[in-house]
Image: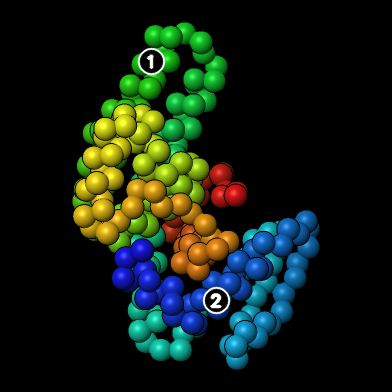
Amino acid sequence: MNPMSLALSQQMPLHRFACLVLLLSAWPLQGQVQSGMSVISGDSVAWQLLDQVLVSPHPTFDDVEARRRYLILRSRVIKVYPYAKLAAEKLDTMNSVLATTSNPWKRHRLVKRFQRFLRHEFEPELRQLTTSEGQILYVLIHRETHMTVFKLIRTYRGWLQAVSWSTVATWYDASLMKTYDPINHPEDALIEYILVQAFADRILAPRTFYFQE
């Protein structure tokens, strides 16, 4: 985890808020509305659940620095999510067609098309991102595809390409093996909250897929 991410996850107000978001969003409700106030370590947070969708006010912070770090995280998530969504949609399209054909030539052509996407569209975008933005993109790709970036490159670009990319990433204290785990990682829980709010505000367009362990 990069220093900014580590510092963010160690901020107690963010940690408590992330845990609350996670606990509330984990309860499955069918046609029910629940709301109330929760007090965690002296902080009161209003919440409402409606058909498994969390409606919550913007998080409050004890100091300006904690809020600044949250806004930086939010900006990065909104910037890189479309890339993760595009990669997942391309992968979904390929897999859905592969499932309906046994023609070797057609299957080969579909895989080649996805490889070209990775090589000419996806990988160049990765090179333009900062280390912190890249790390967030990696976890969002896992959120959308259930594949780490390393596995994605290894599967469709080859082992040598995956190792090469992974080696370069380590130079910048990054990892292509990062996974999305909002259950156990406070920063991932915050990322999920940011996405839910961005979807609700139509800042981002969601896929129909939702992360499942």
Using the image as rendered, state which of residue 175 and residue 21 is in the foreground.
175
Spot occupied by residue 129 in the image (x, y as percentages of width and height): 25, 54
- Which numbered dot is residue 191? none
Question: On screen, 131 above or below 166?
Answer: below
> As shown in the figure, which amino acid type bears the numbered disc 1?
His
Counting from the top left corner in percent of width and height, residue 175 is at: 33, 52
Residue labelled with disc 2: 17
- Left or right side of 66 for 174: left
Front residue of 121 and 200: 121
**Residue at screen point 68% across, 82% down:** 37
Q: Which residue is mark 1?
A: 108
Of mark 1 and mark 2, the one earlier in the sequence is: 2
Helix, strand or loop for disc 2: helix
Q: Residues within 10 Å of mark 2 (few under 14, many from 20)?
A: many
In the drawing, does residue 39 fall left or right of residue 164? right
Under tag 1, what secondary structure? helix
How was this image coloured? Answer: rainbow
Q: Quadrant of residue 161?
A: top left
The residue at 31%/32% (across/down) is 159
Q: Residue at x 32, y 71 (%)?
A: 4
**In this orientation, does residue 172 appear?**
yes
Q: Quadrant of residue 112?
A: top left
* Above-or-below relation of 143 to 109: below
Q: Nearer the viewer, residue 172 or 210?
A: 172
